[in-house]
Amino acid sequence: MLNKEYPLHDMNLVFDMIENAINKGGTHEKAAEEMNLLMHLYAGLPAEAVEQGMMFIHGRACEIPATSDIIPLHVRLMNLLEYLEKIEYLSEIPETMSGEEIKKRSEMMNSLEEHEKLFGTPLLGYRFNSVTNTPAEAKEGEESDSGRLLLMNSQAAVFICNDIYKTAIFYEDKLGFKAAHLDDEAMPHIKLMRDNIAVVLVKGEGSAAKPLREFGIKYDMYIYCSEPFLLHNEIAGNGIKIIEDLPEAKVAQKQGTNRQFVFEDIDGRHICVSQYIESN
């Protein structure tokens, strides 16, 4: 429930109030990121949808159809506004406080964390890129990625297998992946996860299940690794077939490619593990 007076039909003024409140200080470090995410999403909505947000602010949420896809957006806006009202209230400390007032302020202070948990988290499939480099810090010829609204958050390679369960067991036992069996989706498959790598296994037959090198493509997948030596030792120690060995670091410096090695999985795919070099 909001206590301040807000404009009736102007969402831009609401965001001006939010920005002013955050600029006063005392808020969570991601409060501004939350404001930017909400502001970008509302800016892309038709006028009718923005007006729904204003109805939320003025206590008329019951008039909005429950089937509306963007209700989570309005809820997040209310969460931020309620949070900022609490911050403003807590910033004004009276000279004397009754026991009831002390209890109220304590409960309000303890409730702030629940609001802050949502700040910066994805909303309606979007997240706000939190890269803070300014355009002046970007490399010459490159655009700064700061402040960009991202809808695509991750990806997964798709492996077609004759026997997805046999392949899943290999990746679990030999490569340390964790498998999730997702038979309730439109395309029954198994999702494998390890660190930042995701692989989806689907059942298929014939040429679709053959390794890509049979079609003139050298590798079936690249895995970029900060230190391939450690992963090479793990994979070789588990008895996995190494197709191309990892060169010594000094030898790799003289080569024209990244330091890398290649292993073969249970279906004959060749997976290249290439050293990831961070750019300064």
Image (cartoon, rainbow, N blue to C red):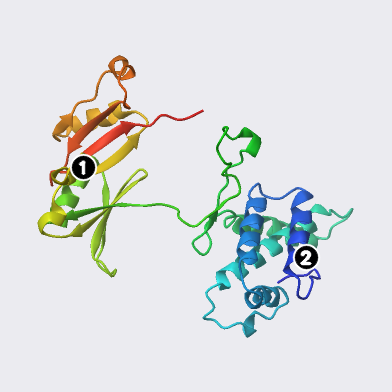
Identified by mark 2, the residue type is Leu
Q: Quadrant of residue 66?
A: bottom right
Residue 96 % position (x, y): 88, 55
Work out how far the residue at label 1 is from the one at label 2, CA to CA, in angstroms: 56 Å
Relative to 144, 244 lies left or right: left
The residue to which callout 2 is attached is 13
Q: Secondary structure at mark 2?
A: helix
Q: Is residue 89 above or below residue 267?
A: below
Q: Quadrant of residue 63?
A: bottom right
Residue 11 % position (x, y): 73, 68
Q: Quadrant of the N terminus?
A: bottom right
Relative to 254, 16 lies left or right: right
Residue that lies at the very extreme toward the right in this rendered image? 95
Residue toward you, 191 or 256: 256
Q: Quadrant of residue 60?
A: bottom right
Residue toward you, 264 or 61: 264
Residue toward you, 145 or 115: 145
**From this viewpoint, is residue 136 visible?**
yes
Mark in front: 1 vs 2? 1
Identified by mark 1, the residue type is Ile
